[in-house]
Amino acid sequence: MTVIAIVGGQWGDEGKGKITDLLAEKAKVVARFSGGDNAGHTVINPYGEFQLHLVPSGIFYPNVTCIISNGVAINPAVILTEIDDLHNHGVDTGRLLISDRAHLIMPYHILLDGLEEERRNKGALGTTRRGIGPVFADKVARLGIRTGDLLDKDIFWSRLSAALELKNAILKKVYRVSPLSLEEIYDQYCHYGEQLAPFIRETGSIIREAAIKGAFVLLEGAQGALLDPDFGTYPYVTSSSPLAGASCIGTGLGPREIDRVMGIFKAYSTRVGAGPMPTELKDEIGDLIRKKAHEYGATTGRPRRCGWFDVVAARFSVQINGLSDIALTHLDIYDSFPSIKICTAYKFNDEVLTSFPSDIAILEKCQPIYEELDGWQESISGIRNFEKLPVGARNYMSRLEDLLTCPINIVSVGPKRRQIILVKPSTLP
Ligand code: IMP
């Protein structure tokens, strides 16, 4: 069968959860490979409505093994709450596994995330304050604590004491706040460890074995390409890679195992937090998109910045992810629009740019150059067949495909699981 990586094509919140939920029906394994509980998506299905931050969307299917892989940072309180919530709604969590290599978000990561944001003052990144920057910084600084460490209390004590000594010195001397108690964190995390122990194990071999046996494996990303620490709008980025390349490192699969990379794009653009967004609409059109699509962060509740589809940014995302397919979500949000704009290039001083600049000082000065297409002005949320879409909607998709040089194989026309159009069903597993 196939290994498909699912990644966010823009600045996150594109609807990866819904597409994973859809494809997971036939999957053997669904593995999350990056991010942490900064991610969040709503899944609506017959069990109810769920806000998932860490558990892969495949959890709702009884045959799917769901894995939170080594590339994900785990806040144990959050994962335990999600497991409880799923359990209370009758969802079996017995097939959920957590990598013993996944790093743990500790109380000092969350505290330092907030303190660092306050120190940045006007230059704040607008992080989710979930401890993401500090936990991934500790991972590469070789100061992190992993889920597997919770399984041996002596090892956990020695790793925690070493890390906390440094963190408390920073809290006291740099930020002048009270230090944290080693004993309290130790007791709390030992308790988490006891509850999480049945889920924690080595997971890379399970994913590799499934892939080698030819099973259908889905690798679920978090955030979006333009928040990548290398290729995104640095420093206004997150701290783990949302790109398809990270689906290997974040799970333990080799690059040759990935058959397809599906990029999820909204029919328009959104961004939460600070940083450049050339097509942002600070007018009634932006407000209308926000209102119709309920564009508020699933994790923080912050209003999302909304704007027209940005082809310059999206084409870059197609390239750096090596996309084979696109799923276009929220197309129905444009139902009432008489016309729709697409940004096809940027104007920077006297130059016309068609590639995405690496320097945000340039990006901040870029003015979008738009192409305008006719809308369709009818409801498409009940349509399930590509041919039945109004001409305006098909033209919009076809223009995006041409500009992005990548086929759109799935279109989402509403929040519910079945509000979906498979453009070429035979090409999907
Ligand atoms: P952090 O990941 O919490 O450190 O936040 C860094 C930036 O990434 C901020 O602008 C956040 O708003 C943004 N961000 C993090 N996670 C998500 C997400 O799941 N969706 C959209 N933006 C996100």
Image (spheres, rainbow, N blue to C red):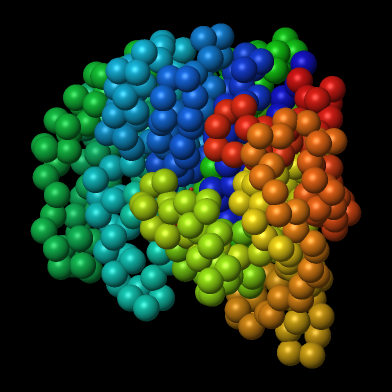
Q: Residue 117 vs residue 379: left or right?
A: left
- Measuring from the top left, give residue 42's x and y in whole percent: 46, 37
Total marks placed: 0
Most extreme residue toward the bottom is 350
- Measuring from the top left, give residue 263's x and y in whole percent: 70, 43
- Measuring from the top left, give residue 383's x and y in whole percent: 71, 34
Along the line of sight, the residue nearer the viewer: 30 or 89 = 89
Please determine whether, in this image, residue 59 is positioned above or below residue 343.
Answer: above
Q: Is residue 262 visible?
A: no
> What residue is shown at x 42% (from left), y 60% (from top)?
303
- The image quarter containing residue 411 is top right
- Measuring from the top left, give residue 170's x and y in whole percent: 23, 61
Please determine whether, in this image, residue 146 is positioned above or below residue 238.
Answer: above
- The image quarter containing residue 77 is top left
Please determine whether, in this image, residue 59 is positioned above or below residue 287.
Answer: above
Q: Which image quarter is the C terminus in?
A: top right
Please determine whether, in this image, residue 393 is positioned above or below residue 251.
Answer: below
Along the line of sight, the residue nearer the viewer: 415 or 156 = 415
Q: Is residue 4 visible?
A: yes
> What residue is shown at x 65% (from left), y 76% (from top)?
363
